Image (cartoon, rainbow, N blue to C red):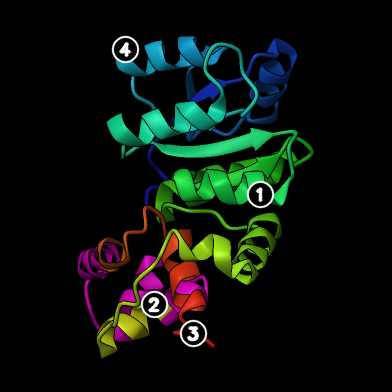
């Protein structure tokens, strides 16, 4: 857990008034330090090369480089950065697209300050933050089999230990909770989780769960 560690946060949004609002909303949260702000995608990519944050809070609609292309580039160059999408869009196709590209959380700009803070801390500690918006979008995506099939064309089998961990992941268990249930260290659980993602070609935990549900591995 990293609750006592200062989380370096970066903001990317082309509306200064919104960035100011986020800054005010997080004021007093001592574990969060905003290290820079960017007002467009190009500026954001430039600042990433100078100072890397732990968490990037990013809009989708930005000048020069939009959030979709920016996220694709970030995942090629900065795999360790946790990216939280914070946008006006709540379209389910957009949500699943961003999660498939490697977003760690997806929030709308109507989200209150407490949930934004919770998403930041959860992503820092557990990699991903799943809310009802994301869960609903992912489940509906699974129903569109023709669309999902092109992402995961082959069925993969997991061993008994992997299946146990997969089930606990789907139940939103933390790494520490999973390690206690399966009697393995948190680091071993992380390794197994990464190996499962690699097996199915998934970039994210959401992608892994989507694969498992599509192939009826999870009830």
Q: Where does label 1 land, which residue?
A: 93
Identity of the residue drawn at 47% across and 26% down? 70
Q: Where does label 3 land, which residue?
A: 216
10 Å crowding of disc 2: few (<14), some (14-19), many (20+): many
In the figure, is residue 86 to the left or right of 121?
A: right
Identity of the residue drawn at 69% across and 63% down? 136
Labels 4 and 2: the sequence-earlier one:
4
Residue 73 belongs to the span the image colors magenta: no
Q: Where does label 4 land, which residue?
A: 50
Identity of the residue drawn at 64% across and 35% down? 86
Magenta region: which residues? 167-195
- Assess whether mark 2 and mark 4 are in contact (beta carbons under 8 angstroms): no
Residue 176 belongs to the span the image colors magenta: yes
Q: Residue 166 carries which label?
A: 2
- Assess whether mark 1 and mark 4 are in contact (beta carbons under 8 angstroms): no
In the figure, is residue 151 to the left or right of 98?
A: left
For the question of whether residue 104 can be seen, the reply is: yes
10 Å crowding of disc 1: few (<14), some (14-19), many (20+): few
In this view, 189 is above or below 151: below
């Amino acid at each position: 857990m990293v609750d006592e560690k200062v989380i370096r946060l970066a903001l990317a949004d082309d509306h200064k008034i919104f960035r100011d609002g986020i800054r005010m909303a997080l004021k007093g949260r001592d574990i969060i330090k905003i290290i820079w702000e960017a007002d467009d995608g190009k500026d954001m990519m430039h600042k990433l090369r100078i100072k890397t944050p732990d968490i990037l809070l990013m809009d989708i609609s930005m000048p020069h480089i939009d959030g979709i292309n920016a996220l694709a580039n970030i995942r090629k160059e900065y795999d360790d950065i946790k990216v939280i999408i914070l946008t006006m869009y709540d379209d389910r196709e957009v949500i699943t697209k961003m999660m498939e590209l490697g977003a760690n959380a997806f929030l709308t700009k109507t989200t209150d300050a407490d949930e934004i803070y919770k998403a930041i801390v959860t992503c820092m500690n557990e990699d991903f933050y799943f809310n009802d918006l994301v869960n609903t979008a992912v489940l509906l995506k699974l129903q569109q089999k023709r669309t999902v099939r092109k992402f995961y064309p082959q069925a993969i089998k997991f061993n008994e230990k992997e299946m146990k961990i997969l089930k606990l992941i789907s139940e939103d268990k933390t790494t520490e909770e999973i390690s206690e249930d399966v009697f393995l260290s948190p680091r071993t659980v992380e390794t197994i989780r990464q190996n499962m993602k690699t097996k199915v070609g998934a970039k994210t935990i959401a992608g892994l769960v989507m694969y498992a549900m599509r192939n009826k591995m999870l009830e």
